Image (tube, rainbow, N blue to C red):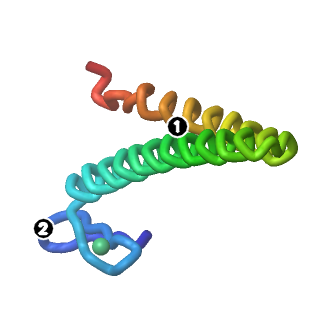
Amino acid sequence: MRNGEGENGSWFQCSVGHEFSAADMDVRTTNMVDAALATALRVLDERAALCADFAGMAAGDHDGGRQTYWQELQFEIEMKAKVVAGLINRGWPDPSGK
Ligand SMILES: [Zn+2]
Protein backbone atom coordinates (compact mmCIF):
# COMPACT_ATOMS: atom_id res chain seq x y z
CA MET A 1 0.00 0.00 0.00
CA ARG A 2 1.36 3.44 -0.99
CA ASN A 3 1.04 6.40 1.31
CA GLY A 4 2.46 9.86 1.72
CA GLU A 5 1.97 13.38 3.03
CA GLY A 6 -0.01 16.04 1.17
CA GLU A 7 -1.48 19.51 1.75
CA ASN A 8 -4.47 17.94 3.50
CA GLY A 9 -2.45 15.54 5.68
CA SER A 10 -1.59 11.87 5.20
CA TRP A 11 -2.96 10.02 2.18
CA PHE A 12 -3.17 6.35 1.33
CA GLN A 13 -3.71 4.58 -1.96
CA CYS A 14 -5.83 1.46 -2.34
CA SER A 15 -4.70 -1.44 -4.57
CA VAL A 16 -6.58 0.14 -7.50
CA GLY A 17 -4.90 3.53 -6.99
CA HIS A 18 -7.71 5.60 -5.39
CA GLU A 19 -6.49 8.04 -2.75
CA PHE A 20 -8.00 8.20 0.73
CA SER A 21 -7.32 10.10 3.93
CA ALA A 22 -5.98 8.06 6.84
CA ALA A 23 -9.40 8.07 8.59
CA ASP A 24 -11.23 7.02 5.41
CA MET A 25 -8.70 4.25 4.71
CA ASP A 26 -9.18 3.01 8.30
CA VAL A 27 -12.99 2.80 7.91
CA ARG A 28 -12.78 1.48 4.36
CA THR A 29 -10.43 -1.44 5.06
CA THR A 30 -12.38 -2.38 8.21
CA ASN A 31 -15.65 -2.44 6.24
CA MET A 32 -14.06 -4.50 3.45
CA VAL A 33 -12.83 -7.13 5.91
CA ASP A 34 -16.28 -7.26 7.57
CA ALA A 35 -17.97 -7.66 4.17
CA ALA A 36 -15.51 -10.37 3.07
CA LEU A 37 -16.06 -12.37 6.28
CA ALA A 38 -19.87 -12.04 5.96
CA THR A 39 -19.67 -13.22 2.35
CA ALA A 40 -17.43 -16.14 3.31
CA LEU A 41 -19.88 -17.25 6.03
CA ARG A 42 -22.90 -17.00 3.70
CA VAL A 43 -21.21 -19.02 0.94
CA LEU A 44 -19.90 -21.64 3.40
CA ASP A 45 -23.47 -22.06 4.75
CA GLU A 46 -24.80 -22.42 1.21
CA ARG A 47 -22.10 -24.95 0.38
CA ALA A 48 -22.78 -27.00 3.52
CA ALA A 49 -26.49 -27.16 2.57
CA LEU A 50 -25.53 -28.22 -0.96
CA CYS A 51 -23.32 -31.03 0.38
CA ALA A 52 -26.19 -32.18 2.62
CA ASP A 53 -28.47 -32.30 -0.44
CA PHE A 54 -25.87 -34.28 -2.43
CA ALA A 55 -25.41 -36.69 0.51
CA GLY A 56 -29.18 -37.18 0.61
CA MET A 57 -29.28 -37.91 -3.14
CA ALA A 58 -26.42 -40.40 -2.77
CA ALA A 59 -28.33 -42.10 0.08
CA GLY A 60 -31.37 -42.31 -2.20
CA ASP A 61 -29.17 -44.02 -4.79
CA HIS A 62 -27.86 -46.43 -2.11
CA ASP A 63 -24.35 -45.14 -2.85
CA GLY A 64 -22.73 -45.25 0.58
CA GLY A 65 -19.32 -44.20 -0.72
CA ARG A 66 -20.64 -41.03 -2.34
CA GLN A 67 -22.86 -40.31 0.67
CA THR A 68 -19.85 -40.50 3.01
CA TYR A 69 -17.82 -38.25 0.70
CA TRP A 70 -20.46 -35.48 0.77
CA GLN A 71 -21.08 -35.87 4.51
CA GLU A 72 -17.36 -35.54 5.28
CA LEU A 73 -17.13 -32.49 3.03
CA GLN A 74 -20.21 -30.98 4.73
CA PHE A 75 -18.59 -31.52 8.14
CA GLU A 76 -15.35 -29.83 7.02
CA ILE A 77 -17.26 -26.86 5.58
CA GLU A 78 -19.31 -26.50 8.80
CA MET A 79 -16.04 -26.44 10.78
CA LYS A 80 -14.72 -23.64 8.56
CA ALA A 81 -18.04 -21.76 8.93
CA LYS A 82 -17.70 -21.96 12.73
CA VAL A 83 -14.20 -20.45 12.53
CA VAL A 84 -15.44 -17.59 10.32
CA ALA A 85 -18.48 -17.02 12.59
CA GLY A 86 -16.03 -16.85 15.52
CA LEU A 87 -13.99 -14.18 13.71
CA ILE A 88 -17.17 -12.16 13.06
CA ASN A 89 -18.44 -12.51 16.65
CA ARG A 90 -15.01 -11.50 17.99
CA GLY A 91 -15.56 -7.99 16.57
CA TRP A 92 -12.85 -5.35 16.73
CA PRO A 93 -10.97 -3.91 19.70
CA ASP A 94 -11.41 -0.21 20.40
CA PRO A 95 -7.87 1.23 20.05
CA SER A 96 -8.90 4.22 22.16
CA GLY A 97 -9.16 1.80 25.10
CA LYS A 98 -12.74 2.87 25.93
ZN1 LIG B 1 -9.95 1.89 -4.75
> Which SS class for mark 2?
loop
Outermost residue to the right: 65
The image shows residue 73 at horizontal and vertical percentages of 72, 43
Between 39 and 28, the one lying in front of the other is 39
Which of pointers 1 and 2 indicates the residue nearer the eye? 1
The image shows residue 22 at horizontal and vertical percentages of 25, 57
47 displayed left or right of 24:
right
Q: In 3D space, how far apart are the residues under numbered discs 1 and 2 (Cα atoms)?
A: 38 Å
Q: Ligand 1 quadrant?
A: bottom left
Q: Which residue is mark 1?
A: 84
| Residues at marks 1 and 2 touching, judged by CB atoms closer than 8 Å | no
Outermost residue to the front: 61
Q: Residue at x 21, y 52 (%)?
A: 23
> Which SS class for mark 1?
helix
Between 2 and 84, the one lying in front of the other is 84
Locate the C terminus by quadrant: top left
Q: Which residue is mark 2?
A: 8
* 85 up-or-down from 17: above or below: above
The image shows residue 60 at horizontal and vertical percentages of 70, 41
Locate the N terminus by quadrant: bottom left
Mark 1: amino acid = Val
The image shows residue 6 at horizontal and vertical percentages of 20, 73
Mark 2: amino acid = Asn
Q: Residue at x 81, y 39 (%)?
A: 68
